[in-house]
Amino acid sequence: MKRPRSWSTCSGTTRRRTAPLLAASWRMWLCTCCSLPVFAAWICRQQYLPSWQRTTSVSGSKPWQVLGRRAVYASAWVGVEQWDVRLPDGSRIPDHHVVVYPVDAVGVVALGADGRVLLVDHYRFMTDSRSWELPAGHVDEGETVEQAARRELLEETGHNAATWQQLGSFYPANGSSTLKFHLWLARDLSAVNSNVDTNETLGLQWFSAADVRASLHRNAHHDGLTMAGLFWWLSLAGSAAQP
Amino acid sequence: MKRPRSWSTCSGTTRRRTAPLLAASWRMWLCTCCSLPVFAAWICRQQYLPSWQRTTSVSGSKPWQVLGRRAVYASAWVGVEQWDVRLPDGSRIPDHHVVVYPVDAVGVVALGADGRVLLVDHYRFMTDSRSWELPAGHVDEGETVEQAARRELLEETGHNAATWQQLGSFYPANGSSTLKFHLWLARDLSAVNSNVDTNETLGLQWFSAADVRASLHRNAHHDGLTMAGLFWWLSLAGSAAQP
């Protein structure tokens, strides 16, 4: 009977066949031995790095696991869902409310050539509050965040900017919603027109860094996006001024 | 016919009656004349004050007027309403969505005796994000904001604080919701127990001001409440350090 090619015995033919396999196994073993210290060093480095520099994977085994989602209210602007979640201690909440936002928003820290910031006098009917805010608004469908930032700056202040820098993004209410905000820094503003959206903009004014710091400490700005953007700008400016 | 007492003529009796009234009118006129310059001075001062120091009343004639509210989803945690609003240009939106939160939340910038801040390793399933956050949570029914701050600090970190200072409050998403956040600064922490809520707290760590500033600039903190609180603390510390 002719043996199939996959059969192997200790004959000379099979020894010739297994020799390259053994050599490959040796190379794999050596490679593993050599890489172990590198891996161990990486582990040690992770321990001593500031915690936010550590490589943290939450995708593999997330501390809170989402088992299901059910919409209880839906609209083009905002929705409410109930999520079925398993907590780290193994307990389960089958109907945790989550406010779901279909679009992000962006705010602009807009600086003139003299270093002052341009703010918008804004009244918010939902909270019945009025204060000086960053130009800001939703990212429209088909727009990038930067395009939305440029559009909002123009619509609410009538200005363009020569230089744009992304500061970062954050979740303003991550204990109850999926809403995401982005912050951009725009420099060297120039006035383009005065056709600002008068529903959004009740007034415009330039403020120095010292005035803004004082007003932030007095809690004179009432919205989180403006506070985050202005504090971030002042902090960067302060760091740059340090020797 | 006997006249009622309220009738008056130019008789001697009525002159005796009107004399005190005339004197009172003179006093009122004098008082008005004297107070006018004071009022004018107040008006002038308002013009030259930084805008956020001006007394702005929005209660009399609000730029956006709420004409009605209609609930479209309600729960103990969050609701959605449609508000009928008139805009500054006179146009009307009969069904503007508003996310309504029945309770506020509070975050604590918690400092040890050495000036470092204690942060909580927190995973947020709604945004699938994990970062170092302030101890924070809802203000429960019947609690003051300060009581909630003390409770959340203890529950999430196992610490009490000797000194408490209110930083301020803000609306994290005032273009879409009524949610309100409060920030408190707690100093001189002391460990009370280690029974922290392991669902909320995945880890605890102390960070220096320099480390926090660097991580904020790198956008390593993902939630707005933490960013506002940490930036506020750093800004106050920076101002205090200046000559």
Image (cartoon, coloured by chain):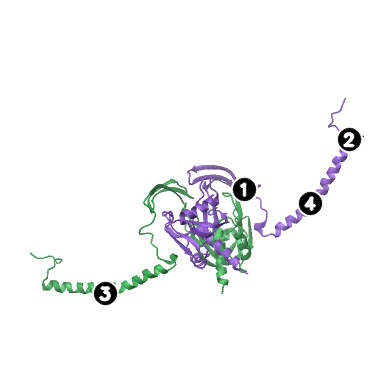
Chain colours: A purple, B green
Q: What's under tag 4, amino acid-wise?
A: Ser
Q: Nearer the viewer, residue A215 or B225?
A: A215
Asked if the residue at tag 1 contacts the one at tag 3, i.e. Cβ–Cβ closer than 8 Å, the answer is no
Label 2 or label 4, whichever comes before in sequence order: 2
Label 4 or label 1, whichever comes before in sequence order: 4
User: Mark 3 Cα within 10 Å, few/some/many (few <14, many 20+)?
Assistant: few
Q: What's under tag 2, amino acid-wise?
A: Thr
Q: Chain of mark 1?
A: A
* Eye-nearest disc, 1 or 2: 2
Q: Which residue is mark 4?
A: A35
Q: Which residue is mark 1?
A: A90
* Eye-nearest disc, 3 or 1: 3
Asked if the residue at tag 4 contacts the one at tag 2, i.e. Cβ–Cβ closer than 8 Å, the answer is no
- Residue lying at the far right of the rendered structure: A12
User: Going 34% across and 73% down the picture, which residue do you hit?
Assistant: B38
Label 1: element kind: loop
